[in-house]
Image (cartoon, rainbow, N blue to C red):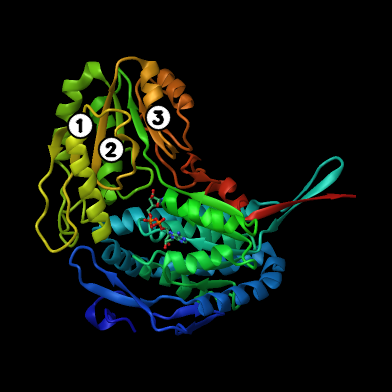
Amino acid sequence: MGIYGKKNGGPILKDYNLYINGKWIPSQGNDFIEVENPATREILAKVPAATENDVLLAIKGSKSSFPMWSKTDPLERLNYVRKIYDYLVKHKDEISKTLSLELGCPLSFGKNRHVEPYLANIENYFEIAENYSYAEDNKDFKIYREPVGVIACITPWNYPFGQIVKKVIPGLLTGNTILLKPSKRTPLTAYYFAEAAEYAKLPPGVFQLLPGRGGEVGNILARDSDVDMVTFTGSTSGGKEIGKLALDTVKKITLELGGKSAAVVLEGADLKMSLKKVLDTVYLNVGQTCSAKSRLVAPRSLKPEIEKHLIELTKSYKFGNPEDESTDVGPLQSKAQFEKVSRYIEIGKEEARLLYEGEIPKGEGYYIGPVIFTDVAPKSKIAQEEIFGPVLSVIYYDTLEEAIEIGNDSIYGLSGMVFGPEKEALEVARQIRTGQIQINDGVFSQNAPFGGYKQSGLGREGSKYGFEEFLEIKAIFM
Ligand code: NAD
């Protein structure tokens, strides 16, 4: 049992072992990773860091269970996965608590923004699976969609529940066997998926959990010739490394990577509503969201009003102790993240004009306040690089062409927003090269395809497009 166990009122988990071949087993090594509460810097638990031998054992298990699982009737697979869902729903309060502790977010935010929407997303995958046809007749041939094989799922720390859902659920439903390597910073939430697999009585080897270090577990998975696909969510640099390794054995690869998304405000936009929507993406989850709209592209003609609203709205977010019920935004997730964001704030002070810097909450944790830079040059570091903290860069434009050019002036293309008269906003949205974009009060949905243009990734998650990433296509001529 981890040192932060049930008796301490913490996460209620089984032994922090590995989950391999349907059993909880200790690692063959003696290396452990400490999981820290970023609000207090207390160690919540220690999880084993899987070794090469652990990983190879798990790969063997996944490989041997694949023929059986891939041939299991899709509706039977659906029944198994429904049981996983039942377990997650039954334990959602406990999961939300564990997630909030290891991520450092308020409990209500953990439940309402990290857990509930992704439980609903699982239901959407069930709907897709129920209605999905794995065979299709064409005039001269038949098309069959078949599972890819053994799939390594490598996930980040910033959405520890949701990012796992988007890989493990469609991966299992489509008949693949799954090896999950969660981030070493937030592995505790991932344990609930292994518990759920055990509860659902998934056949041994169909789902396995390998906590550990990216450069170790992740690299072995990406290299091994018995792994058929790697689905990676994380930084663009990590994705490139994993992608190169996986390409050596020509695995199927999907990459969900970083972003530096633009929110373009047009003249005629409802300013207060627009800016509030932008700030929600930049501040909530402490800006640790890949799709945060951290570049605000705004008309110079509205500069005074925009800056006034930005300051007023920013003051309405309460940064502080996540245990306090009135807190909206907790600390950054780790020391490394704190140092990175602090460094960018210093760079921003040299590159641009500081419009607002919120007070840093007191406490032992990795606390930070909201920061807004204005008159930011489109080519500056704070306009180009992913900061992953509560930092907004405001860039002004004089013409619509310039607004679109700035919107597209990024190596990334993950998300975006456009505010203004609807017809014009749609025209602008069509010209921004990005995987998703919201117009005015258009509501974001987890059930839509999510993924990036340019260096934000390869492939999609969510919807039938995300479901089909886990399938190969076979043409048969009869
Ligand atoms: P990261 O790249 O450091 O790590 C992600 C995962 O990959 C972790 O499990 C890590 O252990 C592993 N890993 C990292 N480098 C590796 C390597 N060289 N070889 C093998 N495995 C490796 O990313 P992070 O800091 O955990 O997450 C934050 C990043 O993720 C941000 O850039 C964010 O934009 C991105 N992200 C993208 C999406 C999306 O859907 N596009 C969603 C969430 C987060």
Any part of residue 21 in sight = yes
| x and y percentages locating residue 325 in the rendered image | 17, 58
Residue 392 figure quarter: top left
Residue appearing at x 26%, y 47% in the figure:
389
Separation (CA) of disc 3 from disc 2: 13 Å
Asked whether disc 1 touches disc 2, contact meaning CB atoms under 8 Å apart, the reply is yes
324 over 1 or under it: above or below? above
The Cα–Cα distance between marks 1 and 2, rounded to whole angstroms, is 9 Å
Q: Quadrant of ligand 1?
A: bottom left
Residue 320 image-quadrant placement: bottom left
Tag 1: residue type? Ala
Label of residue 409 in the image: 3
Image quadrant where one finds the N terminus: bottom left
Q: Position of residue 117 (x, y in %)?
A: 40, 53
Residue 352 tag number: 1
Residue 33 at what x, y percent from top left?
A: 34, 74
Horizontally, residue 35 falls left or right of residue 308, namely right
Residue 140 position, x and y percent, is 87, 42
Q: In the image, which disc is placed on residue 382?
A: 2
Identified by mark 3, the residue type is Asp
Q: CA distance from mark 3 to mark 1?
A: 18 Å
Pointer 3 local density, CA inside 10 Å: few below 14, some 14–19, many at least 20: some
Q: Point out which mark residue 389 bears.
A: none
Judge from the rendering whether residue 459 lies leftward or rightward of residue 360; answer left or right: right
Question: Measuring 64% from the left and 62% from the top, which residue is drawn there?
Answer: 228
Q: Residue at x 21, y 38 (%)?
A: 348
| Between discs 1 and 2, the one toward the N terminus | 1
The disc labelled 2 sits on which kind of residue?
Ile
| Of the image marks 3 and 1, the number of the one nearer the N terminus | 1
Q: Is residue 227 shown above or below 360?
A: below
